[in-house]
Amino acid sequence: MNRRRFLQSSGAAVGAHALGARFSDPRQTRLAVPNRQQLAWQDAELGLFVHFGVNTFSDREWGLGNEDPGSFDPARLDAAQWARAAKAGGFRYMVLTAKHHDGFCLWPSRLTTHSVASSPWRGGRGDVVREFSDAARAEGLRVGFYLSPWDRHAPSYGAGRAYDDFYIGQLTELLTQYGSIAEVWFDGANGEGPNGRRQAYDWERIHATVRRLQPDALMFSDAGPDIRWIGNERGLAGEPNWCPVQPALVPVPGLDGPGIIEALQHGNPDGTVWRPAEADVSIRPGWFWHRAEDEGVKSVDELLELYQASVGRGGNLLLNVPPTTDGLFHETDVRRLAGFGERVRNLFAEDLAAGATLHRTREGAELELRGPVTFDLVLLAEEIARGQTVARYRVEAWTNDAWTVLSRGATIGHKRIDRCAPVTAARVRVVVEDAVGPVRLALVGLFHSPA
Ligand code: FUL
């Protein structure tokens, strides 16, 4: 690792607005930077995952592939209820399991009869993907699809080209019939075991298909190419969490082995490509709805912890909420989403640093507030459009004629949320102790948690 120090050299004031801390440093290195779609996706911060399918009815997490499509019959399905709950929670995009490992399609695919078209739901004329996309857009949310590469139903699975054709055909249906797609989620999971069928996916062709049909869609998988998996299913981003990665470390989805999880968790300060992390986790113990888990829905406090450990560490949070056999989100889940949304809104309702003067200093930035304020949350952001550089920093407040350390961290990136013991101060500073390029803080915000 080629770690250099790139800190500011002059102490000039940079403006009277907390957002205005733009450090220009003539020393430029070749830093990886996000593209426009990645930036917009990172600004969205919160995605809602929706796991739904025959597993919902068989009470399983992984279907076997031989489920009866007749079992799929969500009597009260209302995707508008899902989208409203997502919106109330502050989520900005939704990702639906259009097909999970069992191969059952939530849309009437022309390539298989193993779909909603063979179910009693809406007399076999229904299309969950359509209702989902329409409902999400009606709430102003962007749409994403999960299409499991591993397919336990498809007879061609493991046959190479024949399955790739089938998979790409399904992808083509999803990318041509449902409007503009923000994210395509490629799951690396495979439970075939050592004696199972082996499919060497033609990732190059799969990726090219997405680029051609939806040039603005971002592709997620362990290996990217646009968004990387965070390396665990507990919703936790790493510390550090770099957006840049070395693509050779995780070349294809679904690999395990030493160093892979590490590379996904942390990214790489010298990475050559920009691959922001998405942290996925379920609001319940399982990904699909199980009545036995109705008491296991994460509390608002737990969701807030997850928010801090994902979005608050520069990643996106993809929180799964699974519809029940009725086709609705369970009322407990709906309440928790609303409670979470309200808590986040209240927490960040008033930036106590608004109107402060932000000076750049030799080592970072100093905020001169208009008077003493009491806060227990510090929000930091880098101007990531120009790369991510902060590798270690500390936040301090001027109290009792001395600088007191409030928090320390490694990376900042898109957003960093630090909690500290409540403190009252009129001067606050960010000291960057190590950086791999010019430091450009975009934001220093101070907040006080409501009682
Ligand atoms: C995993 C899958 O095996 C789980 O069922 C779930 O879909 C999760 C999001 O990804 O790899």
Image (spheres, rainbow, N blue to C red):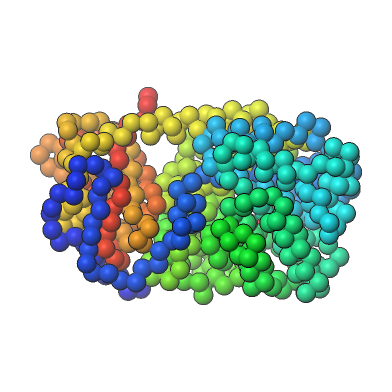
Residue at the spot 84% in from the left edge and 56% down from the top edge: 110
Question: Which of these two is toward me, 255 or 19?
Answer: 19
Residue at the spot 37% in from the left edge and 57% down from the top edge: 384
Question: Which of these two is toward me, 358 or 392?
Answer: 358
Q: Could you say where residue 285 lies in the image, as x and y percent from the top left?
A: 64, 42
Figure check: 320 above or below 267: above
State left or right for residue 73 relative to residue 416: right
Q: Is residue 222 visible?
A: no
Q: Is residue 20 visible?
A: yes
Query: Which image quarter holds the N terminus?
Result: bottom left
State left or right for residue 426 relative to residue 341: left
Question: Which of these two is toward me, 135 or 255?
Answer: 135
Residue at the spot 13% in from the left edge and 58% down from the top edge: 10
Q: Could you say where residue 13 lies in the image, as x and y percent from the top left?
A: 15, 49
Figure check: 394 above or below 214: above
Figure check: 133 above or below 193: above
Q: Could you say where residue 424 lies in the image, as x and y percent from the top left?
A: 21, 32
